[in-house]
Image: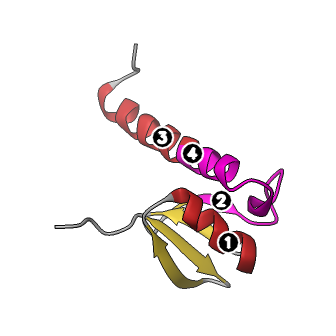
């Protein structure tokens, strides 16, 4: 069974799309503005408040979103289990 897409796109506070890939979320948010969340809570991109627009590089925006998701997961792990080596 397929998993639910984890990249959620919001515009004006309204949930508008779910994407399987961060690059696809970058495309949507670059066209319409808004926010990308991982799940429904972790904000990983806010169009207009980043150092560049997602439309400038979907890959670079997606890499930054993935990095923020990873850092959040790592911090959560370390809160429970202690620092990683």
The image position of residue 61, as x and y in percent, is 68, 52
User: Are circles 1 and 2 on residues that touch, CB within 8 Å?
Assistant: yes
> Residue shown at 65%/82% (left/top)?
11
Q: Mark 1 packing: few (<14 Cα in 10 Å), some, or many (20+)? A: many
Residue where numbered disc 1 is placed: 29
Identify the mark nearer the N-term, 2 or 4.
Answer: 2
Reading the image, the residue beneath label 3 is 70
Q: CA distance from mark 2 to mark 3?
A: 14 Å
Around disc 3, counting alpha carbons within 10 Å, would you say few (fewer than 14), some (14 to 19), or many (20 or more)? Answer: few
Magenta highlight on residue 61? yes
From which residue to which does the magenta span run?
A: 44-66
Inter-mark Cα distance, 3 to 1: 20 Å
Foreground mark, 1 or 2? 1
Task: Name the residue carrying label 2.
Answer: 45
Left or right side of 59 for 21: left
Position above or below: 52 against 27: above
Q: How many marks?
A: 4
Place of residue 47 in the rendered image (x, y in percent of width and height, measured from the top left): 75, 66
């Amino acid at each position: 069974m397929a998993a639910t897409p984890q990249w959620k796109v919001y515009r004006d506070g309204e949930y508008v799309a779910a994407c399987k890939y961060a690059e696809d979320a970058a495309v949507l948010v670059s066209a319409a503005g808004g926010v990308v969340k991982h799940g429904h809570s972790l904000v990983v991109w806010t169009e207009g408040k980043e150092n560049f627009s997602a439309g400038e590089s979907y890959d670079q925006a997606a890499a930054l979103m993935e990095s923020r998701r990873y850092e959040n997961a790592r911090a959560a792990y370390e809160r429970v289990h202690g620092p990683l080596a």
